[in-house]
Image (cartoon, rainbow, N blue to C red):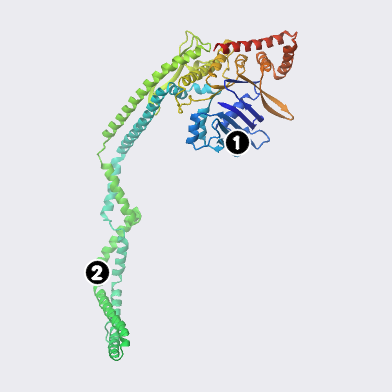
Amino acid sequence: MLLSLKIENFALIDRLELDLYAGLNILTGETGAGKSIVLDALDAALGGKVSARVIRNGAERANIEATFSTNQAIAQWLESQEIDAIDAETLICSREITIKSNRTRVNGVVVNKQQIQELRDRLVEITAQGQTILLSQSAQQRELLDSFGDQAFNQAISLQRQKVAKLFETKERSRKALFERQQNERNRLQHLDMLRYQLKELAAANLEDPDELEQLESDRNRLAHSVELQKQGYAVYEALYQNDSGNACADLLGQAESILTEMVLLDREAEGILELVSSALAQVEEAGRQINNYANRLDSDPEQLETIEQRINQIKQICRKYGTLPEAIAYMEKLQNELAELTDQSISIEDLERKAESDLQSLLKACKKLTELRRQTAIALEKAQIEALKMLAMEKVRFQVGLYPVEPTALGSDHIVFEFSPNLGEPLQPLAETASGGEMSRFLLALKTCFVQQKTRQESQADAESSHAKVGTMVFDEIDTGVSGRVAQAIATQLWQLSRSSQILCVTHQPLIAAIADRHFHVSKEVVGDRTKVQIRLLELEDRKQELAQIASGKSAEQGKRKKEKGKAVLQQGTDDPALSQAIAFAESLLEQAAAIKNQK
């Protein structure tokens, strides 16, 4: 239940604190006095869409704070969101709006849009004038139908909807796979020819080693310079091992080794030097043998050189088309895999067609079951709605939930249409096409009544998933649009009955509805200095009489002010003004009538 609302620098409101009560809270005032501003502020505190334009002129920021009483379901939600409770009895939702940003908080903790929406659904249900437009939309009617009924039935529909949604996704995947395969089949042969041509070209090149090109270029350099390399090899051999002058490195080291051998016989200290020279001699001799073998192996071989040149050209031609050699090898492997997939006939088009048809039939079967559940819910909703409408002075009304087959979607295969006939002898027609403004208002109020009555019957069930369950506050913004007289009285009675199970905050222009309030607030605009601001005042009995008299007479604010001043004099001293006396008497009769209705319930 909404306990209080604090508003600062919001539209025409500079600072306002409003305490709310259980039961039926009515707000009245002239058109444009600011009644809807109060409701807009509450909507903003609960995450509603706002812009910086709502900040009062001259202020830097607007602040709204709504305090609610809490319950076990709210406490569990706070715990799931890791938000600390202020205490065991209250919850605070606040909104700070600046030019650059705005933040929504719950118990001082900043929350995101999804979080505040989840909490909002558990706290309030706001019925604004524009909601009658939403009510005429098939999607909204479907959601209302699916959420009506007891907890067990709601759960059955919810589970079936989930099953339908899952099967719809499966059907869409198989349909897409079949479509793509059919599209691919049209181009498959042409694509296969291209793949096979490229693979033939790559396979003919016999590409295996990513380093082959580098090795071939090395071999080409060696063969192209074989004569030069052979001459240089022999020159090295002569320098290291053997030449006609006897000055080869091996000869000189051999001489040094002989001298050192004689030295060691005289002084063993030279033995280490002898070992170094002997090792060097052995390495020089080995190097000489290897360079000689290398030079002997070198062969100019023009044919081999030409073969290598051809292979290099072949590989480079492949690389110009397919990238580097490693990339060409990788691409060839990719083509082989793609070719295998295209030639894989393990899953034929016929198999895909059978799979798509099977998935479609499974979806249709699930949709049929969902339709059956909806038909059962529709019967219950029709009965409850007609009873509620009859209480709102529509004794001859007919109402039916039409379920018309459509192509299956993730939401089922039903097009939901609320069909309505307010007058005897008139055919059922879609609600949006036949209901007047006043009839739409009554239809909406009756619908809310059905859901609240259903909730009341299920009070012991904690259905946190339903937007119509566990709602402590219901807000109605001019639900009485387009009605008067007996109909307005019926709406007043219905609102009062609803307020026995849920707190109601209602904006109205109807004296019949205002008279039945548990608490009656007057909203007005007043000029203070050079600024206009909105004020709200809780009316006591005598002030209520004046307000009801003013609403009934339809006087302007200035006329109403004078009338109230005269009215107070009438109540205190009496008057000779027949019109004024009649207005006051009418207001008193409304209050007496409202008291009688309350005493009967």
Q: Residue 429 appears at what percent x and percent y?
A: 46, 15
> Residue drawn 33% across and 34% down?
174
Kindly identify the amino acid type of the residue bearing the numbered disc 2.
Answer: Asp
Q: Are marks 2 and 1 in contact (CB under 8 Å)?
A: no
In front: 499, or 376? 499
Q: Secondary structure at mark 2?
A: loop
In the picture as drawn, the residue positioned furthest to the bottom comes out as 266
Q: Residues within 10 Å of mark 2 (few under 14, many from 20)?
A: few
The residue wearing badge 2 is 301
Q: Position of residue 353 (x, y in %)?
A: 29, 32
The number of numbered badges drawn on the structure is: 2
561 vs 184, left or right, is right
User: Looking at the image, is 124 positioned above or below residue 113?
Assistant: above
Pick the residue in front: 150 or 206.
150
Q: Does residue 274 show up?
A: yes
Query: In the rendering, which numbered label is found on residue 329?
Result: none
Residue labelled with disc 1:
96
Residue 162 percent location from the top left of the image: 38, 29
For the residue carrying disc 1, how many other residues have a C-alpha within 10 Å: few (<14), some (14-19), or many (20+)? some
Real-space CA distance between mark 2 and mark 1, rounded to the nearest whole angstrom: 90 Å
